[in-house]
Image (tube, rainbow, N blue to C red):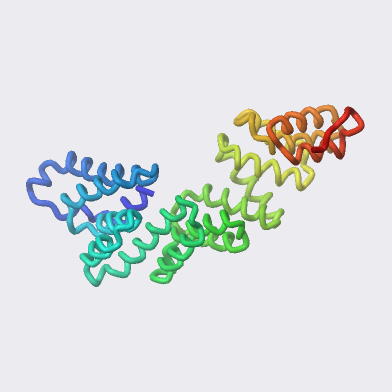
Amino acid sequence: MKEFFQNIDQKIFAQRSLLKVSIKETYDGYVNDLIDKAIDSWEIGQLDMALIYCEEFLEFEPDSVNGIILYSGFLYMNKDFEASKELLNRIGQEERENAEMLFHFLVGVDLLFNEQFQDSIKRMNQALDVDNRFYIAYLHRAYCYSKLGMHRLAIPDYKKAFKSQYNIYEIKANLAYSYLRNRSYFKALRLHKEIVGYFPDNVKVILNTATIHLIFRKYKRALYYLDKCVELDSNLDIVYVLRGLVHYKKKNKAKAIEDWLYAQQLGSVAANKLLYRYAHNYFPFDQS
């Protein structure tokens, strides 16, 4: 997020007095650090500190449009609506549309952070009404659609987000997941095979890759990825449920039961059902 605000206006520090230019290296670093600290504070829920850092930044750069937008957005999140509006009114008419677009985007991202997905979508829509080529807004709207299980709507937004210059493999990973949930299995398989190597420590991506291989009955590859999941996190019950299914399909009932029993210990309802269905003859079993 902070990289986005740093990159959208490279001219923030362009107009300097001779004194400022003489200490440019130190001064730039300090002022940039205020923006970093403001956004970092916001992202970990310390809005009061974010406001303090923004206020100090604007003491150095009172005409920075992006600084004003950031501060105004934080004031809005803090429910200081009048101060937020008054601050936005400082922006000149020529830059007003762009400012409003970024303001809606910033508030929308905060709503996304707070899992208010429907309201976040509305803000992203408002940003896109100003400029439908504001591709980073498509990405965040896609996140919201995905969180709401609306993968059919998330898919075209992820595709548009490729133009945002954001991390292309992160976008592809999310698109692959939406393909999987939307039952576009061939597209999901193709993308997961392409991106899984870029996420060697991401158990969710690896688990989704295992799942799509299981759907296509590619049991050897599914087992490989499920074993990787266990290495990364040994307490995910769904991993043992799926690995048990793979073992069962490969005619290794003993290992299947072993995995399902462990998943049962982790609280898996699915494991209970699988044990009752496939292993009830092996030992007394209470379905409840």
Viewed as shown, does residue 85 lie left or right of 221? left
**In the rendered view, would you say 206 is above or below 65?**
above
Point 74% across, 33% down: residue: 264
Of 3 and 151, nearer the camera is 151
Of 32 and 240, nearer the camera is 240
**In the rendered view, would you say 90 is above or below 210?**
below
Determine the residue located farthest toward the left in the rendered image: 19
Point 26% across, 68% down: residue: 95
Counting every numbered tag in the picture gives: 0
**In the rendered view, would you say 74 is above or below 267?**
below
The answer to which quarter of the image holds residue 41 is top left
Residue 17 shows in this picture: yes
User: Residue 48 location in percent, x, y?
Assistant: 30, 46
User: Residue 185 location in percent, x, y?
Assistant: 71, 54
Residue 162 shows in this picture: no
Of 69 and 268, nearer the camera is 268
User: Residue 180 location in percent, x, y?
Assistant: 67, 52
Determine the residue located farthest toward the right in the rendered image: 281
User: Residue 137 location in percent, x, y?
Assistant: 44, 60
Viewed as shown, does residue 192 lie left or right of 78? right
The answer to which quarter of the image holds residue 204 is top right
Where does the C terminus fall, quadrant-wise?
top right
The answer to which quarter of the image holds residue 211 is top right
